[in-house]
Amino acid sequence: MEHKEHHRREMLFLIGFLLLFFIIFLIALLASVRRVAIFGLGLPYMVEDLIVLILAFAAIIKVLWHIVLH
């Protein structure tokens, strides 16, 4: 019984991460469309937004991979 509860909590945790990374991806996409930088690090807005988009997409794929394997 305890194993099922642990598995359920782990799935909720992973789904929470999935939603978080999806929101970050959407924010970066909207910032790119509006032609503004997300963080204003001094890089061109497109480079900064593209880095965030790629990292968020990679994180989404990784979390989905963990969910599928579980």
Image: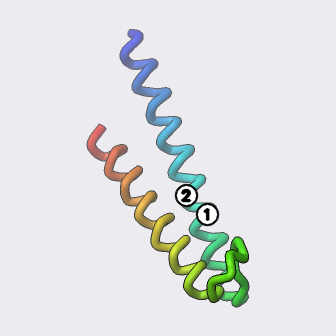
Q: Residue at x 50, y 64 (%)?
A: 56
Q: Position of residue 43 (x, y in %)?
A: 63, 83
Left or right of 14 on screen, residue 29: right
Q: Residue furthest top?
A: 1
Q: Position of residue 68 (x, y in %)?
A: 31, 46
Q: Quadrant of residue 59?
A: bottom left
- Mark 1 burial class by Cα count in 10 Å: few <14, some 14-19, many 20+: some
Q: Amino acid at mark 1?
A: Ile
**Quadrant showing the N terminus:** top left
Q: Quadrant of residue 26?
A: bottom right
Number of marks present in the image shown: 2
Q: Residue at x 59, y 79 (%)?
A: 48
User: Which disc number belongs to residue 60?
Assistant: none
Q: Amino acid at mark 2?
A: Phe
Q: Residue at x 45, y 67 (%)?
A: 57
User: Which disc number belongs to residue 24?
Assistant: 1
Q: Residue at x 39, y 19 (%)?
A: 4
Q: Position of residue 6 (x, y in %)?
A: 43, 21
Q: Nearer the viewer, residue 36 or 22?
A: 36
Residue 8, above or below 31: above
Residue 5, above or below 1: below
- Disc 1 vs disc 2: Cβ atoms closer than 8 Å? yes
Left or right of 52 on screen, residue 64: left
- Mark 2 burial class by Cα count in 10 Å: few <14, some 14-19, many 20+: many
Q: Which residue is mark 2?
A: 21
Residue 25, above or below 37: above
Is disc 2 placed on a helix, strand or loop?
helix
Rounded to the nearest angstrom, the CA distance separating label 1 from label 2 is 5 Å
Left or right of 36 on screen, residue 6: left
